[in-house]
Image (cartoon, rainbow, N blue to C red):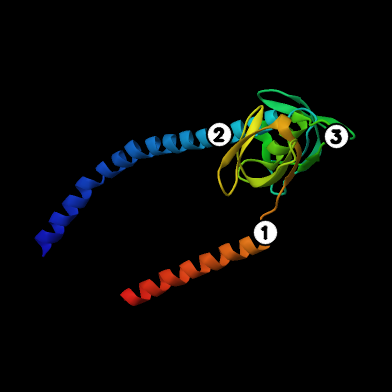
Amino acid sequence: MRRLLAFSLMICMSAMPVMPRCADDISPARGENDTQIRSSKEQKRQAAFREKMELMGRGARVQIAMRGSSAPVQYAGSVDEISTEGFKLKMNDRTLRIGYDMIETLTSKERSYKAAGEPDPVRVRTIAAGIGAGNKTKIRLFSGQRLGGIIQSIGKDGFTIATEERALPIKFAEVTEIRYQKFPAWGIAAIAVGAACALLFVLYAATYED
């Protein structure tokens, strides 16, 4: 027994110098990798804000929640100037220079437009960008045709809407009316019921296996 304890103690002592070296070798690499991942996510985040702001354009009315505080500070106003690093937000009493890295959320205060005469493609683009890709919208074209669907992508001259039948490219100059369409309450309820049923099925399957 004593020989076994002594042998075990020798193994433990010989392993002690090795363990810190392993930790030292792995930890910096892992920390560096985590930093790179966070930096990449932040760059994509800022790029998304920049793209949305450039599509909405000068004069767009927006609401912004700022980062870096437990209780987010919010500002509302109209966009005055836009650059690659940020933009100027014009409010009633002052104008602020806001960088894309300072933003927590960016939402449009305008989500509908109806042309009084000739369509205004710039206004349509502003509203489409404010609604955002992945959200539902209803539009009316200059021809009188009405369409509804999910915005798939937004460009400088038009956007793509996925209807029940197919994806349609639409020019902003063709749109006389556009508005945001909320997801119906019955749709939210259906998703909740579906999720609950899926959970019950998993629990039942796990119980059956036991």
Residue at image point 85% right, 34% down: 91
Q: Quadrant of the N terminus?
A: bottom left
Point out which mark residue 91 bears: 3
| Residue sticking out furthest to the right | 93
- Circles 3 and 2: CB distance less than 8 Å? no
Q: Within 10 angstroms of label 3, few (less than 14), some, or many (20 or more) residues? A: some
Q: Which type of secondary structure does the marked residue at label 2 adopt?
A: helix
Q: Which mark sits nearer the N-terminus, 1 or 2?
A: 2
Q: Distance of mark 1 from mark 2, alpha carbons?
A: 31 Å
Q: Within 10 angstroms of label 1, few (less than 14), some, or many (20 or more) residues? A: few
Which x, y percent locates residue 186?
Answer: 65, 64
Q: Distance of mark 3 from mark 1, alpha carbons?
A: 34 Å
- Residue type for callout 2: Lys
205, above or below 105, in the image: below
Which x, y percent locates residue 114?
Answer: 81, 40
User: For residue 47, what is the image quadrant?
Assistant: top right
Q: Which type of secondary structure does the marked residue at label 3 adopt?
A: loop
Q: Nearer the viewer, residue 29 or 189?
A: 189
Which x, y percent locates residue 177?
Answer: 77, 40
Residue hosting label 2: 44
Q: Which mark sits nearer the N-terminus, 3 or 2?
A: 2
Q: Within 10 angstroms of label 2, few (less than 14), some, or many (20 or more) residues? A: few
- Residue type for callout 1: Pro
Point out which mark residue 184 bears: 1
Q: Distance of mark 3 from mark 2, alpha carbons?
A: 28 Å
Q: Which type of secondary structure does the marked residue at label 1 adopt?
A: loop
Residue 150 in sight here: yes
Residue 109 in sight here: no
- Circles 1 and 2: CB distance less than 8 Å? no
Q: Quadrant of the C terminus?
A: bottom left
Q: Nearer the viewer, residue 2 or 130?
A: 130
Which x, y percent locates residue 143?
Answer: 73, 36
